Amino acid sequence: MKNKITIAIFLAFLAFFSAGSFLFKDKTFSENENRYLQELPRLTAESVASGAFEQDMEDYVSDRLTGREFLIGAKSLLLAGLGIDEVNGVYFCEDNIYIEKKTDADVDRSIYRTNLTALKKYFDALSERGLSREKLCFLPVATASALLREKLPKNAPIFDEFEVLAAAKEELEGYTLIDPSEAIGALETPFYKTDHHWTTDAAYAAYVLWCETTGREARAPEEYNIITASDSFRGTLYSKVLRPDAAYDTVRFYLLKEGTEARVWCDGTEKSFTNGFYDMEYLNRKDQYAAFFGGNYGEVRILLEEQPGTGENLLILKDSYANCFVPFLYGYFDNIYMIDLRYFNGNIAEYAEEHEITEVLALYNISSFVDDKTVGKAGLV
């Protein structure tokens, strides 16, 4: 009886908000959902015949529903109250943690195998040009679904990311492979509760492991001012469910006490970042993780004002996980270059030669690596 009353109230809200949908001005972007909304479709004979107009109009009306974001949150809360532990591809887990749902059926294994082959081909090409095989490194990061498996709902189907790690070790034999799973899995908060990214604490743990593996000395936590940049972050997974009772995450910055002096260019435009790497404006926006470098770009160049004189230049092939990792690499190289193949279409073998690259790090979270077809461009050497 209680469930019937709850459902009736929800349907009443739906009817009320639907009636008001056309009384308010359109908006084009939903900050809470972090996506652009469907625009009013253009009526053409072709769109009608193909059925595209009907589908686009349905999406348009749905996106413009007054109070739509409230209704999404109310629906998520209602379903959770009814014992449903997955909504819109998000698992509701222990300790108010949200974890992305990705099952075997969601993964095309040919993509990640192609990506590993492309990385090997790229590493082979650089090795033939004189780079040491030890200086060619892959750092795949297992995500919350793998490292917080005990938090998942009972018997929740999930893709086994360790399968990719095993394949990487076999495909890239002879090159450096760093698996930070144990190091970051031991942390209290390796991932944000409402976002798919790892935390800065996890990135620091991976940095320490990277130093140990590459024979470098890691900086101790005491060498940083570790600050709470924000305690009001709700991330990408929250955006899919909009539950009003979702946790607020804390974003932390590790700021070197000795300071950082670097010039940073993002897609050819020089940026004025705080402490070299942080765009503080994003802390007042929805996507607070974008405070690291201001988000994703095809190319980022980090040129140190006072170069350490190592004669070493690092190239990073990356996804967004690298954004909070790279600040830890300050001072180990004269120059650091980041390439995101989702937005970069140049030849990265020629790029490495042009910028006198002496070391390469490919850093990806496994969940995105198994889907990202652009990684295959690394093999075009």
Image (spheres, rainbow, N blue to C red):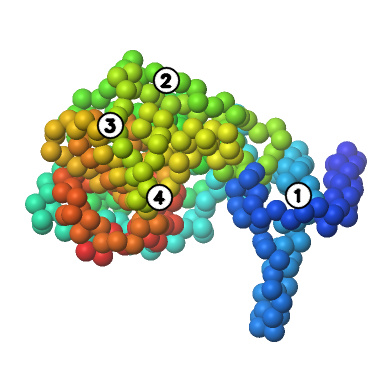
- Badge 2 crowding class, 10 Å Cα cut-off, few under 14, some 14 to 19, many 20 or more, is some
Q: Are marks 2 and 4 in contact (CB under 8 Å)?
A: no
Mark 3 or 1: the one toward you: 3
Percent from the top left, x then y, of residue 213? 21, 34
- For label 1, the SS is helix
Local crowd size for mark 3, using a 10 Å CA cut-off: few (<14), some (14–19), many (≥20): many
- Specify which label sits upstream in the sequence, 4 or 1: 1
Horizontal side of 236 relative to 329 (left or right) equals right
Q: Which mark is residue 274?
A: none
Rendered residue at 66%/33% (across/down): 246
Residue 113: in sight, yes or no?
no
| 374 is higher (above) or lower (below) than 337 | below
Of 155 and 163, which appears nearest the observer? Answer: 163
The residue where tag 3 is placed is 330
Of labels 4 and 1, the one closer to you: 4
CA gap between label 3 and label 1 equals 44 Å
Residue highlighted by disc 2 = 226
Residue 359 location, x and y as percent?
19, 44
First in residue order: circle 4 vs circle 3: 4
Closer to the N terminus: mark 2 or mark 4?
2
Task: Tell me the residue that label 1 is attached to.
Answer: 68
In this rendering, which labeled residue sits more in front, label 2 or label 4?
Answer: 4
Gap in angstroms between the C-alphas marked 1 and 2: 38 Å
Mark 3 to mark 2: distance in Å?
A: 16 Å
Percent from the top left, x then y, of residue 256? 33, 22
Residue type at mark 3? Tyr
Compare residues 132 and 83 and report the one nearer the observer: 132
In the rendered image, which residue does mark 4 sit on?
297
Which residue is painted at 42% across and 20% down in the image? 226
First of labels 3, 1 by sequence position: 1
